[in-house]
Image (tube, rainbow, N blue to C red):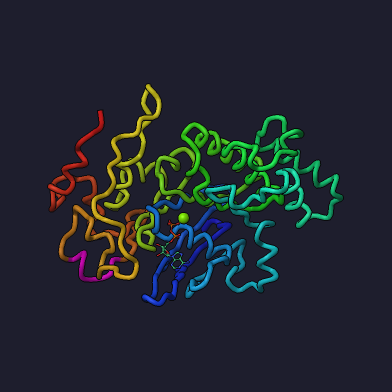
């Protein structure tokens, strides 16, 4: 067994609301090898952010981690004291989010904010911290960093602000970076630049990464492995090339249909083909497979017993009893449902 930097084992995080218990993360397991990137993919509301907040022990009430282990470098983060956990955050595991504006303070310059983050973890004079902040801004390829450091957040573009967040996150040399939809708010060309930057930094900083996104298009060039989440559970986990080439869960197959295609003319988004049906209400999940109501391959067995995550082969797992049929059109019992998928945008 490889020495994983992170092993999430049977993690369950529930929200205890008046209306009932929401299993936002339900028996979630995955590993990240040192220096590699795992992408966590799924529609909005599938439990991706709750999973990452669980790792950081930042789940807000009424949420609570109810079961599982989060082994980071061999220690279970769930067992650390709050004080030790505070030292893990930022210094060993850093996190970046979709909207840098919510994490940046509008009344301080970005250089000051990066310097302050550095001072939290290192004994440096203000001047040294500032110099290091400028150096970090250079490393995330912000042009003219010396001058930019004196800018306030609103003076920077969205892409530059995200670079500032990355500089801040990496300034304490964390081992693991959790990036929760880091490019979702940016336009397509800037998205590509940020992903390229993250790839380069992963090598420079010997980083491991958990990349969270609702867009499978983002993971192709960035991640080694992909875990697909649906209704709080992992439904498929496989190397990225197999996710794209030969998915084994109908939900993954559905997600793939809405991925933008790269053509000679540039990026062309196919007519957005969302998966038919609605994201399930986590308070009222169906028996058996949670995806069954939206699934083109559904048979009676899918809706009676709980479906385990099945080992498809050495490299991948899928929570589908019909995984060997996915991709085989004749296996679909409701052709009228998948008929739309054949329609391709011109
Ligand atoms: P996403 O995959 O979009 O990141 P989240 O992890 O943010 O999804 O949320 C997953 C589910 O957890 C939501 O659909 C919601 O049902 C539940 N949830 C998240 N935060 C809260 C909260 N503060 N209170 C109650 N339920 C929550
Ligand atoms: Mg989220």
Q: Residue at x 50, y 58 (%)?
A: 31
Point out the quarter of the image occupied by ligand 1.
Answer: bottom left
Up the image or down, 125 lies above or below 131; here it is: below
Q: Residue at x 25, y 32 (%)?
A: 345
Left or right: where 30 falls relative to 20: right
Where is residue 316? Give x, y as percent. Answer: 37, 53
Which of these two is toward me, 118 or 205? 118
**Number of disc labels:** 0
Up the image or down, 198 lies above or below 66; here it is: above
Q: Residue at x 59, y 54 (%)?
A: 95
Which of these two is toward me, 109 or 136? 109
Q: Is residue 302 magenta?
A: yes
Left or right: where 326 falls relative to 50: left
Q: Quadrant of residue 10?
A: bottom left
Where is residue 183? Give x, y as percent. Answer: 51, 42
One can see residue 315 in this view: no
Q: From this viewpoint, which residue is outermost toward the top? A: 265
Q: Residue at x 61, y 52 (%)?
A: 103
Q: Is residue 140 magenta?
A: no
Q: Quadrant of the C terminus?
A: top left
Where is residue 168? Give x, y as percent. Answer: 68, 48
Up the image or down, 21 lies above or below 337; here it is: below
One can see residue 296 in this view: yes
Point out the stretch of residues depicted in magenta: 301-307
Where is residue 341? Give x, y as percent. Answer: 21, 41
Left or right: where 284 falls relative to 266: left
């Amino acid at each position: 067994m490889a020495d994983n930097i992170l092993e999430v084992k049977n993690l369950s995080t529930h929200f205890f609301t008046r209306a009932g218990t929401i299993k936002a993360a339900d028996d979630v397991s995955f590993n990240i090898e040192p220096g590699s990137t795992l992408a966590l993919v799924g529609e909005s509301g599938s439990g991706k952010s709750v999973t990452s907040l669980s790792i950081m022990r930042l789940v807000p009430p009424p949420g609570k981690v109810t079961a599982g282990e989060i082994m980071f470098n061999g220690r279970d983060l769930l067992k650390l004291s709050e004080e030790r956990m505070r030292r893990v955050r930022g210094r060993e595991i850093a996190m970046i989010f979709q909207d840098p504006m919510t994490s940046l303070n509008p009344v301080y310059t970005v250089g000051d904010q990066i310097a302050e983050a550095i001072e939290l973890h290192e004994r440096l004079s203000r001047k040294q911290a500032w110099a290091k902040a400028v150096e970090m801004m250079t490393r995330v390829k912000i042009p003219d960093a010396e001058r930019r450091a004196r800018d306030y957040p609103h003076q920077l573009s969205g892409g530059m602000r995200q670079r500032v967040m990355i500089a801040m996150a990496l300034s304490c040399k964390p081992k693991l970076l959790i990036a929760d939809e880091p490019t979702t708010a940016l336009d397509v060309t800037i998205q590509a630049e940020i992903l390229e930057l993250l790839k380069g930094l992963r090598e420079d900083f010997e980083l491991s990464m958990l990349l969270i996104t609702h867009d499978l298009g983002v993971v192709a060039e960035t991640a080694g492995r992909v875990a697909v989440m649906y209704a709080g559970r992992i439904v498929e986990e496989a190397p990225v090339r197999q996710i794209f080439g030969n998915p084994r869960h109908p939900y993954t197959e559905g997600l793939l249909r809405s991925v933008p295609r790269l053509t000679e003319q540039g990026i062309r988004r196919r007519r957005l083909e969302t998966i038919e049906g609605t994201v399930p209400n986590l308070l009222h999940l169906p028996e058996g497979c949670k995806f069954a109501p939206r699934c083109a391959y559904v048979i009676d067995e899918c809706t009676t017993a709980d479906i385990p995550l099945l080992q498809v082969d050495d490299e991948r797992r899928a929570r589908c009893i019909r995984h060997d049929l996915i991709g085989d059109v004749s296996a679909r019992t409701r052709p009228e449902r998948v008929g739309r998928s054949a329609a391709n945008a011109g």
